[in-house]
Image (cartoon, rainbow, N blue to C red):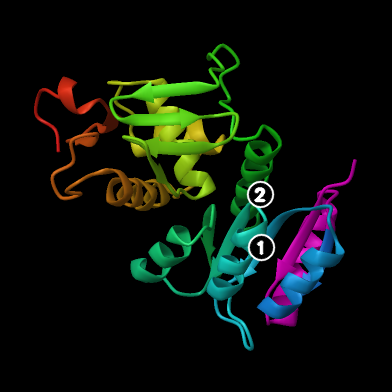
Amino acid sequence: MSIHILICDDEPDIVKALEIYLRAEGYVTHAAFDGVQALEMLEQQEEIQLILLDRMMPRMDGIEAMMRIRDKYNIPIILLTAKSEEADLVLGLNLGADDYVTKPFRPVELMARIRSQLRRYTHLGGSHDSSEEREDVLELGGIRIDHRARKVTQYGEPIALTPKEYDILLFLVRHPGEVFSPKELYLRVWGDPPLGGEGTVAVHIRHLREKLEIDPAAPRTIKVVWGQGYKIESEESGAGRSE
């Protein structure tokens, strides 16, 4: 069965180059040149399974388009951005992007990111470790994850997470107290070597803290173990030098 990918960028040369790369890998491509066209294409092509979305475009930019897409669709979105400022990347990830690639991108890296997102999408956010348990409901402290419905609550209050935030939280809750480096988290959650994408993990962790912690500056659930990585634990079980 063919996999359909929507390319949305206002630069025809970039769209053409991406079409060449993707078609060589066997993907079916669809093109849009601004956010309005992307939304129209999604309405017409129900089989689209991933979107490459440019950040800066006329009429409707990638951020606004992504917000509207997330109102109706849960398919993976990889943001293409020419900006290197962290604030711009944070905004995109916070509003629903699953990953980002900074222009000029390397085709090998982009293809690896695409394959990773497609695997996560087709496995409905499941773990890559086939030996892991598949509980429908997981709880840690006040956090409750209904994996069948992909819903998260904290002390009974719903927590709105992006798909990638959900995947990271699910993985950490399945491994309470274990420490994972950014590189290992990327490998285990995205399913591919990070290829320099460890910073994406830090951005998602920061957003999870903002949504789950009473005081994100003094986290009691998702913690940094200095020089090692991240871990999650219930508020009552925290111990040791972490932050």
Q: Are marks 1 and 2 in contact (CB under 8 Å)?
A: yes
User: In the image as oriented, which residue stretches furthest toward the front?
Assistant: 156
- Judged left or right of residue 106, residue 42 is right
Q: Specify the quadrant of the image occupied by residue 136.
A: top right
- Judged left or right of residue 222, residue 48 is right
Circle 2 Cα neighbour tier, 10 Å, few/some/many (<14 / 14–19 / ≥20): many
Query: Residue drawn 63% across and 51% down?
Result: 76
- Compared with 134, 205 (above or below) is below
- Compared with 1, 31 (above or below) is below
Q: Earlier in the sequence, mark 1 or mark 2?
A: 1
**Helix, strand or loop status at disc 2:** helix
Circle 1 Cα neighbour tier, 10 Å, few/some/many (<14 / 14–19 / ≥20): many
Residue 204 at what x, y percent from top left? 39, 49
State whether residue 186 appears in this view: no
Q: Is residue 107 magenta?
A: no
Query: Residue drawn 30% across and 50% down?
Result: 206
Q: Which residue is mark 2?
A: 114
Query: Range of the magenta residues?
Result: 1-28
Q: Report the quarter where the N terminus lies.
A: top right
Type of amino acid under label 1? Leu
Q: Which residue is mark 1?
A: 52
Query: Residue drawn 38% across and 23% down?
Result: 139
Q: Specify the quadrant of the image occupied by residue 24.
A: bottom right
Residue 73 at what x, y percent from top left? 67, 55
In the picture, the disc for residue 149 is none
**Helix, strand or loop status at disc 1:** strand
Residue 127 at what x, y percent from top left? 56, 26
